Amino acid sequence: MAVRFTEFAEFVESAAFAVPVIAAPMAGGASTPDLVTAVNRAGGLGFLAAGYRSAEAMAEQITRVRESGDRPYGVNLFVPAPPGDPAAVAAYRERLRPEAEQWGVALPEQIGPDRDDWDAKLAVLLADPVPVVSYTFGLPTAAEAAAVRAAGTLQVGTVTTPEEARAAEAVGMDALCVQGPEAGGHRGTHRVADPPGELPLLRLLPAVRAVTSLPLIAAGGLGDGPAVAAALRAGAVAVQLGTALLRADESGASPAHRAALTDLPETAVTRAFTGRSARGLRNAFIDRHGPYAPPAYPEVHHLTAPLRAAATRRGDTTAMHLWAGTAHRLARTGPAERIVTDLWRAAQE
């Protein structure tokens, strides 16, 4: 059984966290139990991504991580959002329909409510607690957070502004993952329609520190040793790496996604694929549809799923969602344990 801690600061100072690097939970397949285990072996903290998985599938991945050793690990949950505007989703469907017909796929005509199995996942984590749980896209209720804490689990809230940091502290988070605009994948804004902030990570960290004393984890654009060192100097107790691990041997990223990280030159923030603001490698799909995508998540995620799946089958990087942070061209290949070890060594030089 993994060692448990009552305070996040206690964990940070422990031998169980010898390297202050956390593997970002990357939903959709990039995060794997093997990646979690590899980062743990390096002395960091691996995270499973429960987003888009059922409670049962989440539990299966937890079991796999536990079987690999007794080091602490984390599980990330997507906080459910209120329903989006059906009329806006319908209009976007009509915009995408010719493209769907071109590739011979059917778009869903009806998209029902989707809470990402939130209640069932919480029930699993309360019945069989894990060392750390983090939240993205919002926060649990105070009662839910209290129940998770009572189960002996540390909790991390993802925040993108000082205002969100205040809310996270008020609900009982033990630490905050401060996500800068440089981060790849979805922005963790607490409301779907909120415009993503533009304050760079190294300025966002002190802005958040000014409103809370909770331990801060830095995320966004951290692709080399100097960037990691700068984030720690700016007040973070640890850094969270996502894009930097996408090309690792243990990553679940597709071959096309791995290659695109070095082939495509720039990123863009878009709602085109999911309805939530997310940073990915800029491609033709983003350029065509980004300005017209409504702030409706997960409705747009489900709407575009057949198009994205078809593009992945074709290996068509002009139409795939290729999440990546601004430091994507620094992503390295090889074992994740070595990537983390080398980054930490470079940060200390």
Image (spheres, rainbow, N blue to C red):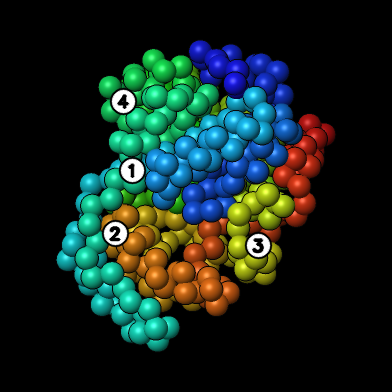
Label 1 vs 2, first from the N-terminus: 1
The residue under the point 37% across, 68% down is 304
State the separation of the CA atoms marked 2 and 4.
Answer: 25 Å
Residue 125 position within the rendered picture, expressed as x and y whole percent measured from the top left: 42, 29
Label 3 vs 4, first from the N-terminus: 4
- Residue 299, which numbered label? 2
Residue 25 position within the rendered picture, expressed as x and y whole percent measured from the top left: 53, 43
State the separation of the CA atoms marked 3 and 2.
Answer: 27 Å
The mark tally for this picture is: 4
Q: Nearer the viewer, mark 4 or mark 1?
A: 1
Q: Quadrant of residue 307?
A: bottom left
- Residue 94, which numbered label? none
Q: Nearer the viewer, mark 1 or mark 2?
A: 1
Can residue 130 be seen here? The reply is: yes
State the separation of the CA atoms marked 1 and 3.
Answer: 29 Å
Q: Which residue is mark 3?
A: 258
Please tell me whether mark 2 sits on a helix, a strand or a loop. Answer: helix
